[in-house]
Image: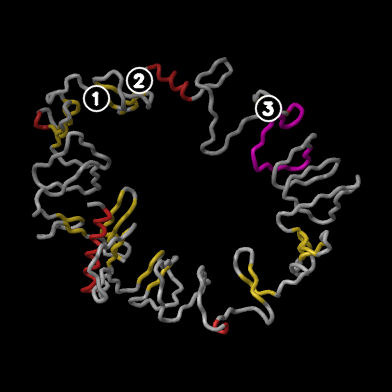
Amino acid sequence: MNMKKIVGLLAAFALSWASAAYAVDNATEFGIEDDLTVLGTGGSATDPDVEIKGFSVFGVTQAAPALNIPAAPGNIFVNGYVQVSSGMYVTGSSTFTAGLYSTGISSFGVPGSIYISGGGTGEVLKKLAGGGMEWGLPSTPMGTLNRLQLVRPAGTLADSLFLQNAGDTSITMITGSSMTILGDGTDGLGVSGAAKLNGAVSILGANTFTVGTGLTSLGGALNVTGVSSLTGALTVNNEAQFGSGVTKSTFTTAGALNLATDADIVLTGANAQVTLPNAPVVGADAANKTYVDSLAAGAGPWDKSGLNVFLDVITDNVGVGVASPLAKLHVSSNNPTASDYLFRVSSGPLAGNDRFAIQADGAALLSGTLTATGLVTAQNGLSVTGGNAAITNNLTVNGNAQLGDAAADIHGINTAPVAGTALKVEGVDASGSYAAEFYSGANRVAWFKKK
């Protein structure tokens, strides 16, 4: 049985309970993430296949929806589109607050039964470019309101590309238009106020020019006498100098940095670093930390400080029974039998004093309590044969898991098992707490939650 059928079965159970106790709200929520299928064939007007007795919301549930209907049993709030393919019969009056769109022929009563607010005497409805309508005066042969007129070759008037604002204070060329100015050799275009140019601009002559956003190409030299701020990347294709005279530092055309006399490189901040080559080449080269540490370790791998013994190089590995250790401590055996021990911890000299031991064949002995704050992996299985096993922290099972081996077994999650109940799940009795969640891959498909 697939997940959709299981969810549909659970939903059918939930709906079957509603017929007996639909008026009782016990603050329990049953949710389905994807879809709900109810395959009923015997429904009737008095006993339908699906019964929803309470107030229903379809679509996103809003925190404070602007309801124009009572949130009462039987009422429905739809937060989205509704499409009816087989017609709709409405016995009561209806209100549309966001417009009504009808693609077919619709029948209304006398013209007086159609009412559209707004507009004035003599105005008519005119279609907008976006498909809507607006009130306005009937169009005249003089053209569109506020558009300047031009004379066509036939002698008629038509709209030009110039639009004058309603206050008669400015003229704008409409979107998509352009203008070409053929100068007389002096000033082709003279602007005494501010000008905004959105396209490419080419300036010729010895003129002062202020550039805003966009790419600027200068054919000659650039002389900046004030403080400059560059917010983007700066690429210099030739050498660059900083300072003047004997205090001048230079980036050469090859990318090398030559510092002036008494000039320093100062790094500030906790993570500021200078990366050097793996090993110095000539006598004046600086050496990095890895190279220096490799020389310091030449005296021997072990060091002693008081009661502590440690490796000189903290990145080294130690091998016992293996020439090329693969971990900080790598213990191996050439005799993988039960009697060959890889690790033993004892409280005395006798075999019976062992507290923890690992044999070469993978067997492990634990005579005390095992407390693990991290991940414990048992490749050969884990068996608890005596007494109850208690795990006080998290338990993760990556493979197949089975609870019980008989139909009469009882189990409890977050609670003690109850006789006659195969599985009892107890969650936190607080609003928003989930008693159970069901997932298909990474997608949640169903849940039980306290409202």
In the displayed structure, 91 sits above or below 200; it is below
- Image side of residue 65 versus residue 193, left or right: left
Query: Which label sits in the foreground, 2 or 1?
Result: 1
Element class at badge 3:
strand
Considering depth in this image, is 288 or 134 the residue closer to the camera? 134
Specify the color scheme: secondary structure
- Image side of residue 109 versus residue 439, left or right: right
- Image side of residue 389 versus residue 318, left or right: left
- Say which residue appears at 52% left-offset and 69% top-offset: 101
> In the picture, residue 150 is in which quadrant?
bottom right
Considering depth in this image, is 52 or 375 the residue closer to the camera? 52
Question: Picture coordinates of residue 56 (x, y %)?
Answer: 35, 71
- Say which residue appears at 30% left-offset and 52% top-offset: 439
Q: What type is the residue that disc 2 sits on?
A: Pro
Circle 1 sits on which residue?
331
Q: Which residues are magenta?
A: 223-246
Question: Picture coordinates of residue 219 (x, y %)?
Answer: 78, 35
In the displayed structure, 391 sits above or below 280; it is below
Question: Picture coordinates of residue 429 (x, y %)?
Answer: 26, 64
Q: What type is the residue that disc 1 sits on?
A: Val
C-alpha span from label 3 to label 1: 55 Å
Q: Nearer the N terminus, badge 2 or badge 1?
A: 2
Circle 2 sits on which residue?
301
**Contact check, label 3 and label 1, Cβ < 8 Å:** no
In the displayed structure, 136 sits above or below 200; it is below
Q: Nearer the N terminus, badge 3 or badge 1?
A: 3
